[in-house]
Image: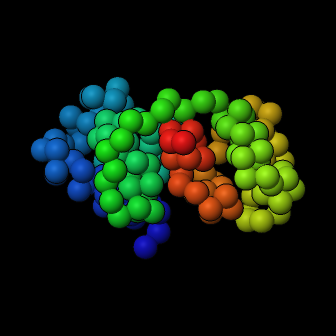
């Protein structure tokens, strides 16, 4: 299964498990109901920001929501730092060069430097690619866990 399908199914499961509907979740997160419906219908993947908000709401990992982890791990998640800071931390922590990251998977050099310079942030697909490159959970890539 792909990430979008996994996310939609896990989000639906979490809604059922918590006894709420898409409108309740949307209202709690300050989002439109149609946005949650698009997630559930596999029409749209959330931004990393909204993925984190949903994970925080359900007190679960982003990895669980994306289907990258089978267990719901209730833990104290950290607030995500700016991604430009996080990518520098990851490079140092894993002792990797920027070149090894953007040549590894289909991440362009320009896109990588947009993130590193704080001009933009990666989408969920690219965060998943980074987690694979660094061989770590998505939550670690975005700074929700140590």
Q: Quadrant of residue 143?
A: top right
Total labels drawn: 0
Q: Position of residue 83 (x, y in %)?
A: 66, 36
Quarter of the picture holding the N terminus: bottom left
Residue 73 point in image, percent of width and height: 34, 50
At 32% from the left edge and 40% from the top edge, which residue is drawn?
59
Q: Residue 84: horizontal and vertical position, in percent?
A: 72, 34
The answer to whether 114 appears left or right of 124 in the picture is right
Given residues 66 and 77, the one toward you in this image is 77
- Is 23 or 1 nearer to us in this picture? 1
- Residue 136 seen in the figure: yes
In the image, residue 49 sits, relative to residue 91, either above or below, namely above
User: Coloring scheme of the render?
Assistant: rainbow
State which quarter of the image contains the C terminus. top right
Q: Is residue 5 above or below residue 124?
A: below
The answer to whether residue 109 shows anywhere in this view is: no
Query: Residue at point 50% right, 42% down?
Result: 145
Viewer-closest of 110 and 81: 81
What residue appears at the point 56 percent right and 47 percent down from the top-left corner? 140
The relative height of residue 96 versus residue 1 in the rendered view (above or below) is above
**Residue at the farthest left position:** 19
Which image quadrant for residue 18?
Answer: top left
Q: Residue furthest bottom?
A: 1
Q: Is residue 82 left or right of residue 67?
A: right
Residue 94 in percent (x, y) is at 73, 52
Pick the front one: 56 or 112: 56
Residue drawn at the location 54% of the way across and 32% of the way down: 80
């Amino acid at each position: 299964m792909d990430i979008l399908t996994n996310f939609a199914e896990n989000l639906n499961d979490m809604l059922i498990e918590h006894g709420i509907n898409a409108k309740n979740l949307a209202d709690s997160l300050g989002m439109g109901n149609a946005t949650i419906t698009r997630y559930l219908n596999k029409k749209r993947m959330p931004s990393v920001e909204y993925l984190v908000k949903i994970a925080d709401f359900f007190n679960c990992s982003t990895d669980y929501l994306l289907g990258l982890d089978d267990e719901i791990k209730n833990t104290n998640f950290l607030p995500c730092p700016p991604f430009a800071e996080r990518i520098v931390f990851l490079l140092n922590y894993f002792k990797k060069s920027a070149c090894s990251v953007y040549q590894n998977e289909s991440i362009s050099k320009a896109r990588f430097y947009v993130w590193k310079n704080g001009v933009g942030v990666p989408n969920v697909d690219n965060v998943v690619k980074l987690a694979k490159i660094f061989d770590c959970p998505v939550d670690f890539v975005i700074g929700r866990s140590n």
